[in-house]
């Protein structure tokens, strides 16, 4: 009797083992059957990741811009046409930010010049309107991915960093070649704010946790600088190239329609 019971238990264990192995094989086959996303799928996946409420806000900004374009001047300094172009620049920058040409191994993505519309707007209308438009754009970016470490980090990373794009407004009223120092200054301003925000985040990190792409970084400043520089430097290059190709003509058109 004991022998029969032992035999039955052994058979049951063997059956359970076979079932477990079969389930594991099925899981492995399922995982193997899942193809890696294509470059195009990865590039546009942020469109689907963005909450519907954020898209509604973007559409509202576009609608406001269209309305203001057909309205009369509301003041000498802040006229409806300037507000309209600001709204359209914010919306265009946001849409371009959803296209990922490359996802960096740490954080951030390289986009097709998502900062350029805001910088061109600032170059046409000045630093103060550019700072305001950049701040609104930063809030949209935050609502797309609502996370922050602390209030100072939020202000630096989501408000001031994007507001800094308005520094391209130093090119207002100057020769077209000033657009390029303006772009560099704007991206540098964003980088300074982003690096400062990064230092707040990693303030309590142990040295062993300062790792980028498998390599340990020597200092917290270097970690934050590399973390943000890996995507901001390619972005700067793209903005400079696109700025050279379309920037002067667009600036002439914006100045003509003021």
Image: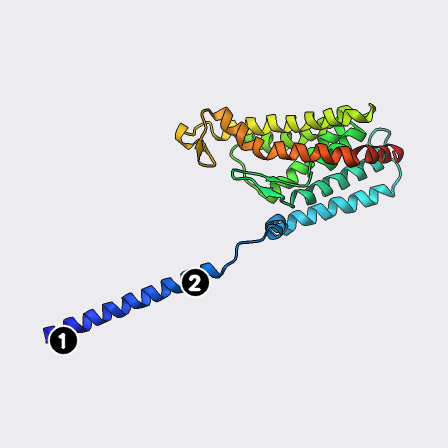
Give the image quarter of residue 148.
Answer: top right
Q: On the image, which quarter does residue 255 sit in?
A: top right
Give the alpha-carbon distance from disc 1 to disc 2, as whole Å.
Answer: 37 Å
Q: Which of the marked residues, 1 or 2, is nearer the chain's N terminus?
A: 1
* 17 lies above or below 61: below
Colouring style: rainbow
Q: Nearer the viewer, residue 125 or 209?
A: 209
Seen in the image, is 189 located left or right of residue 221? right
Tell me residue 45's x, y (percent): 60, 51
Residue 91 location in percent, x, y? 72, 43
Image quarter hosting the N terminus: bottom left
Residue nearest the observer in this picture, 221 or 75: 221
Left/right placement of residue 122 relative to residue 48 reads: right
In what element is the residue under mark 1? helix
Q: Which residue is mark 2?
A: 29
Rendered location of residue 32, percent (x, y): 46, 59
Q: Is residue 177 left or right of residue 238?
A: right
Estimate how packed mark 1 is, as few (under 14), some (14 to 19) or many (20 or more) residues with alpha carbons within 10 Å.
Answer: few
Residue picked out by circle 1 = 4
Q: Secondary structure at mark 2?
A: helix
At 89% from the left edge and 34% from the top edge, which residue is drawn?
A: 256
Q: Which residue: 59% across, 35% down?
A: 231
Mark 1 or 2, closer to the camera: 2
């Amino acid at each position: 009797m004991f022998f029969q019971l032992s035999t039955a238990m052994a058979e049951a264990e063997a059956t359970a083992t076979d079932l477990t192995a079969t389930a594991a094989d099925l899981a492995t086959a399922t995982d193997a059957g899942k193809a890696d996303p294509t470059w195009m799928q990865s590039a546009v996946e942020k469109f689907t990741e963005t909450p519907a409420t954020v898209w509604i806000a973007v559409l509202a900004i576009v609608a406001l811009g269209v309305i203001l374009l057909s309205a009369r001047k509301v003041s000498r300094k802040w006229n409806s046409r300037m507000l309209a172009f600001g709204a359209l620049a914010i919306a265009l920058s946001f849409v371009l930010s959803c296209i990922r040409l490359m996802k960096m191994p740490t954080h951030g993505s390289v986009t097709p010049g998502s900062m350029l519309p805001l910088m061109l707007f600032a170059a046409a209308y000045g630093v103060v309107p550019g700072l305001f438009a950049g701040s609104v754009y930063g809030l949209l970016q935050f609502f797309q991915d609502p996370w922050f470490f602390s209030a100072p980090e939020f202000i630096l990373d989501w408000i001031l960093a994007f507001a800094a794009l308005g520094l391209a407004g130093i090119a207002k009223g100057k020769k077209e070649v000033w657009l390029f120092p303006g772009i560099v200054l704007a991206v540098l301003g964003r980088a300074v704010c982003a690096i400062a925000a990064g230092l707040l985040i990693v303030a309590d990190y142990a040295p062993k946790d300062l790792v980028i792409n498998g390599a340990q970084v020597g200092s917290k400043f270097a970690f934050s600088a590399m973390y943000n520089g890996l995507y901001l430097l390619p972005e700067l290059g793209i903005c400079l190239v696109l700025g050279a190709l379309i920037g002067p003509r667009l600036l002439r058109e914006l100045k003509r329609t003021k």
